[in-house]
């Protein structure tokens, strides 16, 4: 599959290589049988030790939380991705995962962390949601994709999650959770892997339950407009999607449940687009329809 989108005088061409979707799909064997009763993070076992585990030492002092940084992000991101995919499972459609990955890479290339190896995956769930963990592990449900109408809408949703990564919202949430007394007591153990699991469990649970602050969500929305515009997509696609989700959210709590206040967010995005001079861009409805197989009635 060749993938081109004009952006700022450049063209992206992603073809014939191992995609980040394969990285996400490679986690699937680790999720067989679902998560353990004791800990979501147990799914990664001893693979998350080393430097990262050592930073979260017995006693769980807040100082160790501050030591968590970019070097530890990959281990945290993988563990959180495993935790979330253990709950929902990955969609077995490799083609769909690849398509979402290529759209995600196109947007990520216009972000401040374009050098990062972002990993995208589609969750095997009819719920409507999307999640972003540290180090660029981004997951969107099949249910969310099936409610989209074109590629610009998909790009907008992925851009929102990419913005969370660029702003290090997940990493900061991890630090905040480690500062809480309950978390500090929970990781009071000499088992470094167990300590890391507790920390990643806390973050995964927070992401699923939607504990990003309103300011963080608003910031991610505004940056999403910047990213999709720079990538050559029509930012109005993201606004349209938010409007539909706001209408659905009013009657169904499971629609974007981890992203509350959709109506207010749609209004802020509309204002941001107007502030940018109402730029147009690609919507690519036909390409989206070709790559996203909708369920038959």
Image: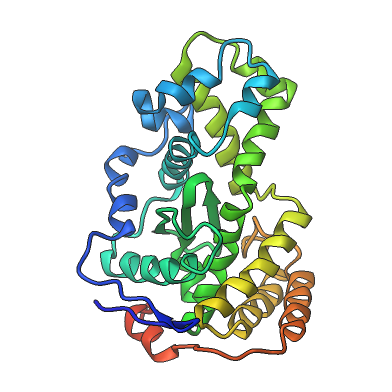
* Residue that appears at 47% across and 42% down: 77
Percent coordinates x, y for residue 166 in the rendering: 58, 54
Q: Is residue 265 above or below residue 281?
A: above
Residue 260 is at least partly visible in this image: no
For the C terminus, which image quadrant?
A: bottom left
16 vs 146, left or right, is left
Q: Is residue 120 above or below residue 96?
A: above
For the N terminus, which image quadrant?
A: bottom left
Percent coordinates x, y for residue 269 in the rendering: 72, 76
* Image quadrant assignment for residue 66: top right
Name the colouring of the figure.
rainbow
What is the number of callouts on the image? 0
Percent coordinates x, y for residue 170 in the rendering: 60, 45
147 vs 254, left or right, is left
* Image quadrant assignment for residue 61: top right
Pick whichever, 137 or 140, lies toward us: 137
279 vs 52, left or right, is right
* Residue that appears at 40% across and 53% down: 117
Percent coordinates x, y for residue 99 in the rendering: 34, 71
163 vs 216, left or right, is left
């Amino acid at each position: 599959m060749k993938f081109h989108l004009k952006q700022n005088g450049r063209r992206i061409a992603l073809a014939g290589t191992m995609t980040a979707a394969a990285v996400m799909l490679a986690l699937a064997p680790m999720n067989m049988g679902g998560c353990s009763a004791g800990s979501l993070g147990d799914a990664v076992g001893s693979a998350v030790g080393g430097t990262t585990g050592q930073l979260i030492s017995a006693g769980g002092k807040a100082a160790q939380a501050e030591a968590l940084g970019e070097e530890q992000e990959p281990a945290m991101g993988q563990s959180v991705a495993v935790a979330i995919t253990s709950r929902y499972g990955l969609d077995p459609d490799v083609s769909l995962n690849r398509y979402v990955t290529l759209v995600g890479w196109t947007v990520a290339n216009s972000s401040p962390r374009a050098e990062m190896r972002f990993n995208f995956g589609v969750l095997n769930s009819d719920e409507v949601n999307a999640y972003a963990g540290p180090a660029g592990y981004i997951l969107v449900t099949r249910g969310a994709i099936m409610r989209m109408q074109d590629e610009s809408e998909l790009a907008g949703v992925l851009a929102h999650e990419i913005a969370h990564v660029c702003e290090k919202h997940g990493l900061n949430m991890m630090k905040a959770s480690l500062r809480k007394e309950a978390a500090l007591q929970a990781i009071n153990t000499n088992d470094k892997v167990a300590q890391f699991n507790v920390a990643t469990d806390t973050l995964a649970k927070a992401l699923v339950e939607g504990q990003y602050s309103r300011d963080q969500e608003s910031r991610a929305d505004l940056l999403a407009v910047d990213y999709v515009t720079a990538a050559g997509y029509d930012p109005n696609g993201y606004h349209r999607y938010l409007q539909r989700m706001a209408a659905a959210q009013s009657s169904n709590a499971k629609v974007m449940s981890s992203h509350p206040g959709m109506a207010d967010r749609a209004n802020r995005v509309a204002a941001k687009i107007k502030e940018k001079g109402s730029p147009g861009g690609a919507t690519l409805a036909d390409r989206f329809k070709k790559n996203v197989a909708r369920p038959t009635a």
